Amino acid sequence: MYFPTAFVIKTPIPVLLLMLFGALLFVLRRKLDWERLLPLVITVGIFLAGIFSRVNIGYRYLLPALPLLYVVVAQLGQPDYLRSRFAQAGVVAALVLTLFLSMWTHPHYLAYFNELAGGPDNGWKILADSNIDWGQDLQAVSEYLDQKDITLPNISWFGTATLEAYGIQGATIPVKESTMNDSFYPDRPSPGTYIISVTQLLGVYLDEPKRFHWFQEREPQDKVGYSMFIYDVPADGQPVGLALSGIGIAMIELEDFDRAFNSNDIRPRWYDARTSFVWPGGQSEVVWAAVGDDHLPEHPALMQLYPSAEASIRGQGEDRLDYNLFEISESPVFSRLSQTSGDNTRFYYDSDWLPEAPLPSEKWNTTLQPLSEVALFGDTLELLGYQLLSPSSLKPGDVLEMLSYWRVHRPPEGQLKAFVHILDENGELIAQNDKLDVRMKGLMVGDELAQLHTLNLPTELPAGAYYLQIGLYSEETLERLQIPIGESYKAEKLILEQVMIKSD
């Protein structure tokens, strides 16, 4: 009964009365006038087709019936149809009222519902999709944001137009992103302004229809038009920095979420715990890491960055995925860098690294300059230090392992990679590793990172001195980030130290 319902609640009541009155008079007075009865027969056929149709997506499919019904109504204007002055006055009043409703509804015609549905303000409780919401209010949203001086709202709208086309700067609430990368927690939305269109709010076409159930249970603070609902979500706890690996935030059970974080102000970062580490303590007083069982680090040097091998909380989320929640109140980076070096582990965290220099190596002594300040790449990531995990002397075919440690000075605009090279005395590349398994999006000032680098030495490698260097480059443009050296010189990489290769 979709189409009959849509017709009854989206057609102005005066028009419904005129149609009903006209049809009754027509049938009662001209029962055998098939020429005039034909519009009613076709109209009934259209409605019957709608009743049995599976395409229940809009009033627009009833539009072919309206001209036929208007033909029936138009006959009320014939002198021999309405002899009663009372009936004539009723028809005129209905027409005037229809004109008034049309003017009152302007410009929100798509969202019109009559009083049987509670008017346009309540019609969404009965019908959604193209009956009320086709993204038509985005321009009004843009004007609303300017008037209210609201910046960077969270928006979910039904339509194909882009926010940029309307000058809206906001964060799109993901509705089709994979669960692993989802930053939205349906049961505890993060603080901020949310603008959600009716069709999205009801989850009509969402894979998870209850995605916005938290908002469905609350009255919006405001509306734009009749299709865009405005919600202001306050913070109910301290900011929580949360590093995620092998699990999405929405996959954490609500009981574990509340027990660990005790806040809705979650600020997620993403990384691969099998090869990297993130301490998301920038601008957050409470710091946690959530790691799926399949992503738990196996390398001892990475595991030592966590406060304990045992998680603070173990849980089981969606699809029976086991996960581990680690509370990491203080950054482990400096505590690791300040440790005493052992036979197979050496730590470096001063600024005595040397910027790149012309090769071959006999020219180095005259051209190399020590860093005068921190090793800051492209004004984004600062190299805090590195940790060699291999013996001080290597042999051909050995594996050199290294952890590089970084701090976010300014969040990068795109994805970055770190390159670690081993060069011979002529500057020829012998081995390399390009990795930074941390997503740059979401990083905040003060966050600290670690990356495991593994370099396989060639089996046919002459004994002698080799050189270890490091740098950063943009994954999109492949352009290397520069390091300012003094007032005029800039380098693209740092020489870390000399590596000795011994013969077998």
Image (cartoon, rainbow, N blue to C red):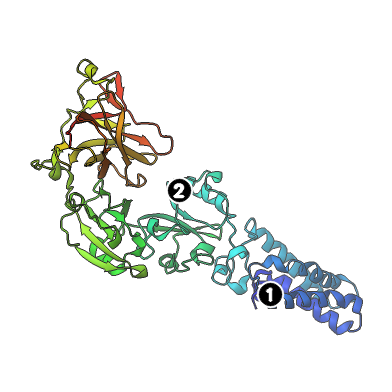
The N terminus lies in which quarter of the figure? Answer: bottom right
Q: Is residue 427 above or below residue 289?
A: above
Left or right, residue 362 beside residue 221: left
Residue 463 as seen in the image, left or right of residue 210: left
Image location (x, y in percent) of residue 424: 26, 28
Q: Is residue 183 visible?
A: no
> Which residue matches tag 1?
53
What's under tag 2, amino acid-wise? Gly
Of the numbered discs in the image, which one, if any, rests on residue 15? Answer: none
* Number of disc labels: 2
Q: Crowding at label 1, few (<14), some or many (≥20) Cα neighbours within 10 Å?
A: few
Q: Which residue is depicted at the point 71% across and 71% down? A: 14
Q: Amino acid at mark 1?
A: Ser
Which residue position holds label 2?
170
Residue 223 seen: yes
Give the structural element (helix, strand or loop) at label 1.
loop
Task: Tell me if residue 88 comes above or below residue 139 in the rendering.
Answer: below
Residue 221 appears in which quarter of the rendering?
bottom left
Residue 8: x, y in percent?
67, 74
Position of 176 with respect to 270 (left or right) is: right
- Along the line of sight, the residue nearer the viewer: 495 or 383: 495
Q: Nearer the viewer, mark 2 or mark 1?
A: 1
